[in-house]
Amino acid sequence: MSDKEAVFLSEKWILSHRGAKNIVDPYRPYSWLVEKERTHDGRVEDTGIIFLTNRECPFRCLMCDLWKNTTDETVPPGAIADQIELALEKMPGVKHLKLYNSGSFFDVRAIPEAGYDRIASVVSSMETVIVESHPKFINEKCLKFRDMLKPELQIAIGLESVSREILMKLNKKMSPEEFRSSVNYLTANSIKTRAFILLRPPFLSEDEGIFWAERSIDFAFESGIECCTVIPVRGGNGAMEELAKDGHFKKADIISLEKVLEYGIGLKKGRVFADTWDLNLFSKCKHCLDERTERITRMNLQQEILIPVECGCS
């Protein structure tokens, strides 16, 4: 690692390239949506996603832009339940719910533990509730919340990459061993787990990005993960734009995302999804973008490798 690259590991450097946060309401989620997802038993059903407004994550990861919609202080104990209640009124009929809070659900500075009871009551009609957490917050609080819930609890953990060098450069403040230990703890306590995996984080070429995403899928399933979501890294947080200027970051190609998705599905070890948000950012060809987007979406839902898109850009 060069001296210049070492600068990028500094939280001070990461924070220095941020813009201003958006104005948010602690009693209102900053976004919500409904998407189709294939369940672990093969059904394709509506899943609600609520992007909760809460305190900023204490881990300042290099690639993260979720801080844009966070508060500087811990929200009041009833605020999170109010946010969930409001959003659920806008998406009736969903059976599965993802509560994404721009950090870790079990970070009590983000979501006060005093609010767990009412949150559990508000989501009682769901079949599944999925929350996210950094390994450092995986502890007995997960079990406490699980025991309050009527629906099944699943926990998503950001592995990002099994490359130790990349994890360090991302300022993730975790190791592959910590990830595996958290998964083992949750599995031993009958809680299913998911992994977020990055495609082409900074400091990797296109081929290296594919290689490490595939190795990360391998590691996740070997650790006991039930489901993986592959996320192509985007810009938009200031730091990534600075890295791009120096040639340390370039967005992955949509074809690489297809390859990694095919690899993961082909393993037949669990569900593998590709994040489909703003796929136009990763396409160099306007002629096949719609076909590739449709193919990726269908592979997500069917968990089968479909006939490749034929285009000269390949």
Image (tube, grey):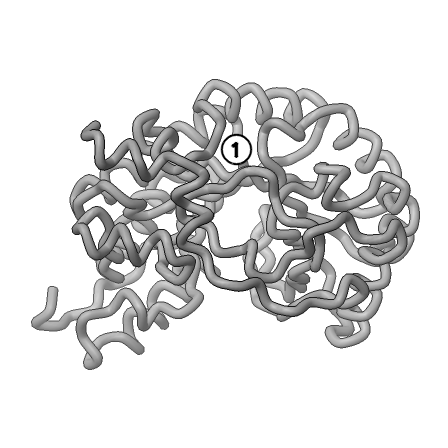
Q: Quadrant of the N terminus?
A: top left
Q: Residues within 10 Å of mark 1 (few under 14, many from 20)?
A: many
Using the image as rendered, state which of residue 151 and residue 104 is in the foreground. 104
Against 185, residue 271 (above or below) is below
- Residue 142 locus on image (x, y percent): 75, 32
**Can residue 31 be seen by looking at this rendering?**
no
Q: How many marks?
A: 1
- Residue 110 locus on image (x, y percent): 72, 45
**Can residue 277 be seen by looking at this rendering?**
yes
Three-letter code for the amino acid on which mark 1 is drawn: Ile
| In-image side of 39 versus 298 (left or right) | right
- Residue 171 locus on image (x, y percent): 43, 34
Q: Residue at x 19, y 30 (%)?
A: 2
Q: Residue at x 42, y 64 (%)?
A: 276
Q: Residue at x 22, y 76 (%)?
A: 288
- Residue 223 locus on image (x, y percent): 49, 24
Q: Which residue is mark 1?
A: 225
Q: Quadrant of the C terminus?
A: bottom left
Against 142, residue 126 (above or below) is below
